[in-house]
Amino acid sequence: MKKESSIGGIVVGGQPDASDVGSGRFGTIVNCRPPEEEGNVTGDLVRGTGIAYTHIPFTADTLAKEHIDRMRDALRDARGTTLVHCNGGTRAAVAVAVVLAERAGQGAKDVRAALDAAGFDITGRPYERFIETYFK
């Protein structure tokens, strides 16, 4: 995995490879990468492993409430250690931080704090506007 961190006990990171998937570490993997993104092979890697797999594709420009709704459901139904990933980790971290802040009755500043603590900088990216709008 290119980058890995944790937000609220959920592992967020970049594209996993075969050793990440085969390690037995993850019971659930949520993939935020659109199918057409180069190197998006998670579906193939998890096939036949028994790992619960959910695909919620979005980009910084397409992130919408429906993606957060689907992420909320995926995290609610997750079993075991959960990995939420994208290519580099940022969009996965944003979605997880939004769901966890919402669950805790928190807001946009708490999402930013969680992202900062996990090492994800969204300054000047579309995620900033999405988070502010989402919690209004």
Image: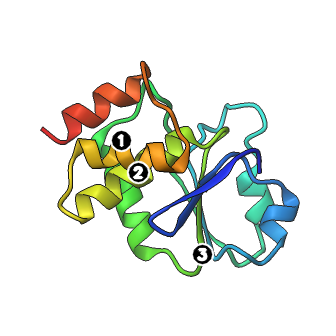
Secondary structure under the numbered disc 2 in the rendered image = helix
Q: Is mark 3 on a helix, strand or loop?
A: loop
Query: How many numbered marks does the figure carry?
Result: 3
Q: Residue 47: give x, y in percent of width and height.
A: 76, 66
Q: Residue placed at 33% from the left, 50% from the top?
A: 98
Task: Let me know if residue 57 appears in the view.
Answer: no
Q: Which x, y percent locates residue 57?
A: 52, 42
Instruction: Name the amino acid, label 1.
Output: Arg
Q: Residues within 10 Å of mark 2 (few under 14, many from 20)?
A: many
106 on left or right of 71: left
| Kind of residue sitting beneath label 3 | Thr
Labels 1 and 3: the sequence-earlier one: 3
Q: How far is mark 1 from mark 3, CA to CA?
A: 23 Å
Image quadrant where residue 23 sits? bottom right
Vertical comparison of 78 with 69: above or below: below
User: Sequence-wise, which precedes: disc 3 or disc 2?
Assistant: 3
Nearest to the observer: residue 20 or residue 73: 20
Residue 112, numbered label: 1
Please, is residue 121 above or below residue 69 in the view? above
Whole-angstrom CA distance, mark 2 to mark 1, is 5 Å
Q: Which mark is residue 90?
A: none
Mark 3, mark 2: which one is toward the viewer? 2
Q: Which residue does the image show at 24% across and 65% down from the upper left?
A: 104
According to the image, label 2 marks what residue? 114
Residue at the limit of the structure toward the right, as seen here: 19
Specify the quadrant of the image occupied by residue 43. Answer: bottom right
Q: Quadrant for the C terminus, please.
A: top left
Image check: 123 left or right of 133?
right
In the drawing, what numbered circle is on residue 81?
3
Do the numbered discs 2 and 1 sit on residues whose CB atoms are within 8 Å? yes
Please name the residue shown 60% across and 75% down the image: 81
